[in-house]
Amino acid sequence: MLLTALVLIPALGILPILLASRSAAAVRVIAVAVTLLELAVSLLVAARFTVGEAGFQMVESVPWLPSLGVRYELGIDGISLTLLVMTTLLTFISVLYSTKVITTRVTEFMIAFLLLEIGMVGVFMALDLFLFYVFFELMLIPMYLIIGIWGGPRRVYSTLKFVLFTLAGSLLMLVAIVAVYLASGPEGGRTLSLVDLIAGRGRFSADFQVWVFLAFALAFAIKLPMFPFHTWLPDAHVEAPTAGSIILAGVMLKAGGYGFIRFALPLFPIGVQAWLPVIITLSVIGILYGAVVAMVQKDMKKLVAYSSVAHMGFVTLGIFVLNEQGMMGAVLQMLNHGIVTGGLFLFVGIQYEKTHRRLIAELGGLANRWPLYTTCFAVFTFASLGLPGLNGFVGEFLVLLGAFRFAPPTGLGGSFWGPVAALGVILAAVYMLWMFQRVMLGPVREAYAKLPDLSPIEMACAVPLVVLTVVLGVFPQPVIAVIEPSLKHVLALATDPSIQVAVR
Amino acid sequence: MVNLVWAIPALPLAAFFVNGLFGRRWLKQATGPIAAGAVGASALMATAVFLEVLGGRAQTTVVLYQWIGVGDFRIDIAALVDPLSAVMLLVVTVVSFLVHVYSIGYMSHDHGFHRFFTWLPLFVFAMLILVLADNYLLMFVGWEGVGVCSYLLIGYWFERHEPSVAAKKAFVMNRIGDWGFTIGMVTTFLVFGSMNFVDVFHRVGMASQAVLTVICLAFFLGACGKSAQLPLSSWLPDAMEGPTPVSALIHAATMVTAGVYLVARSTPLFEAAGPALPIVAAVGALTAIFAATIALVQNDIKRVMAYSTVSQLGYMFLALGVGAPVAAMFHLATHAFFKALLFLGSGSVIHGMQNEQDMRKMGGLRRKMPVTYWTMLVAGGALAAMPPLAGFWSKDEIVGAAFLHGDTLLWGVGVFTGALTAFYVTRAMVLTFHGEPRDQHLYDHAHESPAVMTLPLIVLAVGSVLAGFVGFPPEAGFIHGFIGPVVQLHGAAHHPEYTVIAALAAVSVAAGLIGIGIGLAMYRGRRPDPAAVARLTRPVYRLLVNKYFIDELYDRRFVAFFTGFGGVMSAFDVHIIDGFVNRLGWVVSAAGGGLRRAQTGVVGNYALSVVVGLLALMALYGGYAVGVLR
């Protein structure tokens, strides 16, 4: 019941918020308490998780639409557990930080955030394709409102763009889900349950897989986002309120990467093989392109947004080189990017709340007055550029190792993609340090010489992220041990030679 | 003691945490002694470890825990204690300790005192990880760690523009080298199935020479970045924006020698790879003479020392390239002492001259700063390779090795650069300490530094005299017997005739004496007058003063290219990719506007379109179902 509890807690939390809606202070306290409880339950789930098992655990399965064979089926494995805990943590931090900065329509904001949390935890637990789709869409609507109501000056354009992009992808996915459903068996025996679908994936012909995989891949590629489907991201981030940016970059992008690993890879191994050269190429382009474009950005948020495009390029690269190191790197990169980029967006937001400036040229010398802020921001900066010893390095290095190892029967192999992707690591240092220099260093500016350093609440938001950034860099192995069995299982399904032989 | 080797880096790390967490509010000036005490304790432990290894303890691996393990890729946090790392441990901790003590005095008036003593022990920690690592990836952790500390400490006075820029430049140029390091270590793993030094070196035979060459050149690119060799050398002189003790420790004695250590550590790979070593030798020799010529005309005392460091590092790579890794390590060790001393001495001068670094405003200071003068004289002599000072033994061995290796050209470069070295160090000493003061006001206020600063100078001066004797007699000294077996697996040390060695040494010393002689003649006797010489050789002089225009090339070409390229790509993103999206949105909404006219309100029309749509869907689905079920 723990997994259902994770879905229910935010839902039930909406009720007291509505009851207390007259007092903004009460609403804030309730929202923080609910997300804290959610975090605690997710940690309880983690504590009960059996490390070393490949399959799904704590599965809850009841018929939902029996006539269609759709089930309410939740379960977790090592991959989803990691992302689940990251989600509840980032949501808690976002809500906690928002208690300070959201002053209009507090009730609506908190309700939107709780709805968003339902969608996010659901996405990482759903084992039925239809249920997954429902949660996937559920994430979209609250975020649409969060950007559209509490966002910056161009919020309407940005949020509409964000929704249209994502909808275009998810409608394609819906079509694909219907196709999968129809192909899953004879009438009466059809299913959308992931476990059953994998068992019966021999029914999916090669042609079918190529096209259905493409539909799923487009949906996930837009969500991640992959080059060239990324242009909604910088706009959405620039306009989103800080909490929205943290969740958008920290969690929602990961739904794309997770979707690849959870559904696209095990269900359509032939589709994977067919599209893999394209995806690898776009990933590496994304790594370099995101970095080069980030380099010349004038707005801090845009810079971090483009750096996310580069980082997500590492995720898809790691997934599609189809070896253990690459895919492990991709999962770790998702987790670490959530922590580090969540932290970066948090700190850009904190800074903005104080100085009301976000253009790099208008900032400078912040380090003179804010030692605490500077220390935390420096940790995130160095983690983001992949400094060994901090968490960002582990995932990035494993992806690179996997990329070097990539050996396709035809076309360009790892000895090309590996070194080229590694160039992104140089560029990351350029754009991150250039931003750090222009924003943090240099003479102090009079306009904000007297602004205070981090407040206790800001510290409370920052410290968990800083600690995780260091700890996961120094001791990544416990997390790797949680992920590894499930990941091996997925990899075996995606590269199972018997399937390929049967078709060819 | 060896089993407790992890305590050596743990102590500075603890000092980092204590000073970082409590320094600003509570500890304040106490941070200095805390950091120095921790590093001092490390130095004592390192000495104990060194003695144990000396006592015959074989190679030991001390595993702390498993860091990363995915599939067949496994990396431990583990230390490899052998003679090579023992020497490095000793040099790093001893010099670090002395610099810490010195800094307590040098930084005493700085408002960021606690910050300085937070980062300096962190640097020591990272450097010790680099030295102790038993595999390439962990070494890379230390390698990048020292890079970050270098970044932080170069940019220590970050309120000013130049240090921030210099810090970023250093990190980015190092990153270019790290690209090579990454390629090198990943390829190493793919070829040998391990990144562990011991495993890899045992399996050298598994790889083809071509692959080994790729690996070695990739590693060497990393070494060029860290050790400021051409074409990645220009960050080091700029790094002088950092406080002088930082220049002494990081940018002279320890971090910049990491590239030498990397190549020396990887000797089995380099020996087996054919064309890699000659390239190392050529780059080293070229960098040595390149940097020495620039040092001839610098007026900033720290810049002279900085170019000198680049040049001396070039000597070390020359040694590695001609198959004399012992000589490289030997020179690394002696250079750590005398160059740290030259920097700290320069710092003492700067400290006493109200932060003036321009030698044209100095002169006659030996009367005001006798301790600084005499200790720097010793170090300068060592740099000029005058017997019996430390630099003589180690540098001569390098130049001699080039000759014995059959590379007469490289030998000639080495000897000539030796003369240049002797000249610029003489020039620096004369301009600073001799003659009449050229800025009477500064001179009147100049003073000798306090004991906390001069005592480390004296200790280093003793080291600059004695360190050379670990390599005596030449080619068969203590250091050859100690680390030779680690770095010379195949090519056994050659023992040439002593008459040959003596003859080679005589040539080198003569070249050095000529350099000193010209230096004295020009800057003490004004015969010929330096200004006249500069006028006479104007094109050359201009080239040297402008450092061969390398910075201009990098800034104007590469940086401008990349920012321009980034701008173009950004415009591409906004106008082409996103422009396509927006145009699509426009088309859709325009089409929606057009379709609005189809909303006639006549039910029959709607029914018709529903039927048409249904038929179309059925047709599509039918065709599809046929395709699937076929």
Image (cartoon, rainbow, N blue to C red):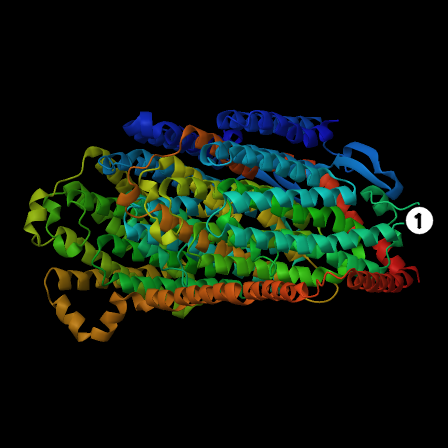
At label 1, the amino acid type is Glu
Number of numbered discs: 1
Of A422 and A39, nearer the camera is: A39
Above or below B197: residue B172: below
Of A422 and A113, nearer the camera is: A113
Q: Residue A346: image x %, image y %?
A: 48, 40
- Residue with the mark numbered 1: A187
Above or below B374: residue B65: above
Name the quadrant of the N terminus of chain A. Answer: top right
Above or below B534: residue A118: above
Residue at image position (67%, 56%) is A168
Residue at image position (79%, 36%) is A73
From this viewpoint, is residue B497 visible? yes
Q: Quadrant of residue A480?
A: top right
Using the image, name the chain to which the residue with label 1 belongs. Answer: A
Above or below A38: residue B435: below
Q: Residue A398: image x %, image y %?
A: 62, 48
Q: Residue A160: image x %, image y %?
A: 58, 53
The secondary structure type at the circle numbered 1 is loop
From this viewpoint, is residue B475 visible? no
Q: Residue B259: image x %, image y %?
A: 45, 53
Name the quadrant of the C terminus of chain A. Answer: bottom right
Of B159 and A118, nearer the camera is: A118
> As drawn, is A69 to the left or to the right of B529?
right
